[in-house]
Amino acid sequence: MRRPVQIAGVTIQPRSSSEDASLAPVAAAHAPVPVEGQRCGLVAIVGKPNVGKSTLLNALVGQKISITSRKAQTTRHRITGIRTQGAAQYVFVDTPGFQTIHGTALNKSLNKTVVGAVSDVDLVLFVVEAGSFTTADAKVLALLKPGIPVLLVANKLDNVHRRGDIAPWLQSMQERHAFTEFVPMSAKQPKDIERLLGICEKYLPEQPWWHAEDELTDRSEKFLASEMVREKLFRLTGDELPYTSTVVIDKFEEEAGRTAKRMLRIAATIVVEREGHKAMVIGDKGEKLKRIGTETRVELEKLLDAKVFIELWVKVRSGWADDEARVRSFGYE
Ligand SMILES: Nc1nc2c(ncn2[C@@H]2O[C@H](COP(=O)(O)OP(=O)(O)OP(=O)(O)O)[C@@H](O)[C@H]2O)c(=O)[nH]1
């Protein structure tokens, strides 16, 4: 029997070795026992690219589930993060920033994911940068269905130097939509996160939890591995690499270990659009690619409580973001 793993106060349940390592959820679901007074519901986090949705999701869940970077459009998938605290279980869905500029197949697929995520939830957190409201924000707001409560999360409040400007701005926001509440905050401030959780709780319907108390996400370990490579890729290449670069996991295997620790062998391909991008990812004498691999391995070993071997490749596939079939083959719906 493997022990459950504690990370940042939450437990990741080990899986039995007979399960397919690549498809099994990170936490094993054991049927929750219904308890009177429990609340549980879906909370969607929406907003234009780069407003801090993934940072917010990770802070709300208390663990890194969704990747973040300074580069806009880092998030490409609907991600469920789960937080259980007191009587409440929050099931969060992160969404890709709504794309308003490019008409590629990739962007159309991203937009479809956003619309799907907001149509069937108990609460929407509409995230903007405090003090700002652009056409891109307005386009996301227009997607929200009437009848679902929407909180205006005015994020990055720490960047607003003239706090006096916030009250009139909030007033102007009131005219744009019937927001149920306004939450000026910073996703990087733990006490703001606690306050937001408290506000969200009352919107969760009274019903038994859907997930075990210690579940974090329903995404597979294979998915988390590809997200981790993507995060390191974007962090380490800075703004030079176009966001259309992606990561495909070619191999995700658990080896029957001779030791108590699990052993995972992962092979991933970083897909870029141009030869020049390939050189950028590989770096001088392969040093950049090596660093991406090392940083991914260190974080995955912690997250999955395993010894990880990772092999990275870089391939050029020009125009992949424009090719619908190829977008689907890379795992986007
Ligand atoms: N100063 C400050 N920066 C923040 C805050 N929240 C997020 N950020 C930064 O904003 C940038 C974008 O954050 P993400 O969480 O990746 O944004 P996102 O909305 O998920 O972006 P997409 O994946 O492009 O949709 C990162 O550099 C974060 O560190 C905040 O409260 N204050």
Image: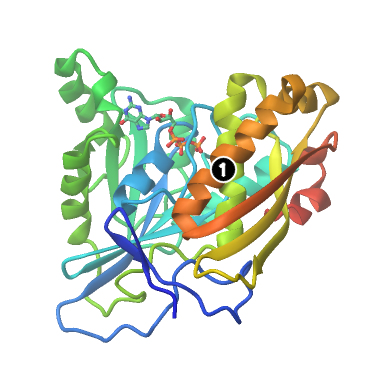
Q: In the rendered image, which quarter is residue 81 located in?
A: bottom left
The answer to whether mark 1 is within 8 Å of ligand 1 is no
Relative to 102, residue 333 above or below: below
For the residue pair 215 and 1, the one nearer the viewer reads as 1
Crowd class of label 1 (few under 14; some 14 to 19; many from 20; radius 10 Å) = many
Quadrant for ligand 1 reads top left
Res 235 visible: yes
Side of 25 relative to 90 (left or right): right
Q: Secondary structure at mark 1?
A: helix
Residue at coordinates 61% horizontally, 43% vertically from top-left? 229
Q: Residue at x 63, y 39 (%)?
A: 293
Residue 135, placed above or below residue 152? above
- The residue at the point 49 percent across, 55 percent down is 79
Circle 1: residue type: Thr
- In percent of width and height, residue 306 lies at 52, 60
Screen quadrant of the C terminus: bottom right
Quadrant placement of the N terminus: bottom left
Asked whether residue 333 is in view, the answer is no
Q: Which residue is mark 1?
A: 296
